[in-house]
Image: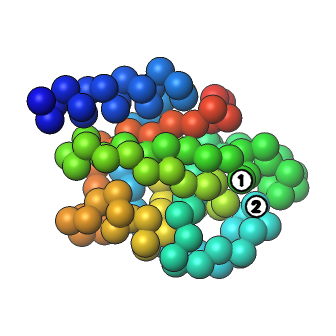
Amino acid sequence: MHSFYIFLSAFLLIRTTVGYMGDITHFNPGLGSCGMQSSDADDIVALSIPMMNNPANPNLNPKCGSTIHIFNPTTGRSHRATVVDTCQGCAPQDLDLSPSLFRKVAPNGDGRVHGISWGGRRMGS
């Protein structure tokens, strides 16, 4: 029954959003490329350079402030996060999470977790 719920959650994530899969890491936020101040306790995320595709003024990026859904197939849980920054060292489909969000998504994570599904309505490139 547990695998059915994992399948259903993943299906709903992909059905309602553009879906990606990558690694997650964590960073200590501050003033992000979107011009928003964030703290370690906020449920925020930084997208890779190619995923953000920032305009000349990154504060005007339509992805800034958008919500993404992050799904960990190991735990079967989904979490929401707000896009506030650009991750300089991320591979195209990787995410950099605030420390508190990283602990929620990957409670047993050691700093990098592979195979995390994620997506959002404004993520199409």
Instruction: Determine the secondary structure under disc 2.
Output: loop
Q: Is residue 99 left or right of residue 53?
A: left
**Category of crowding for the residue at label 2, using alpha-carbon neighbours closer than 10 angstroms: few (below 14), some (14–19), many (at least 20):** many
Residue receiving disc 1? 65
Task: Locate residue 119, reporting x and y percent.
Answer: 51, 37
Camera-side residue: 76 or 89?
Answer: 76
Q: Is residue 98 left or right of residue 58?
A: left
Task: Locate residue 6, reporting x and y percent.
Answer: 24, 33
Image-quadrant location for residue 62: top right
Q: Residue at left 35%, top 63%?
A: 104
Q: Is the Cβ of the residue at disc 2 closer than 8 Å to that at disc 1? A: yes
Compared with 74, 18 (above or below) is above
Image-quadrant location for residue 82: bottom right
User: Which of the labelled discs sits on residue 38, or is there none?
Assistant: none
Residue receiving disc 2? 34
Residue 93 visible at all: no
Mark 2 or 1 closer to N-term?
2
Q: Quadrant of the N terminus?
A: top left
Instruction: Determine the secondary structure under disc 1.
Output: loop
Residue 82 visible at all: yes
Camera-side residue: 54 or 7?
Answer: 7
Task: Locate residue 59, reporting x and y percent.
Answer: 83, 58
Camera-side residue: 49 or 62?
Answer: 62
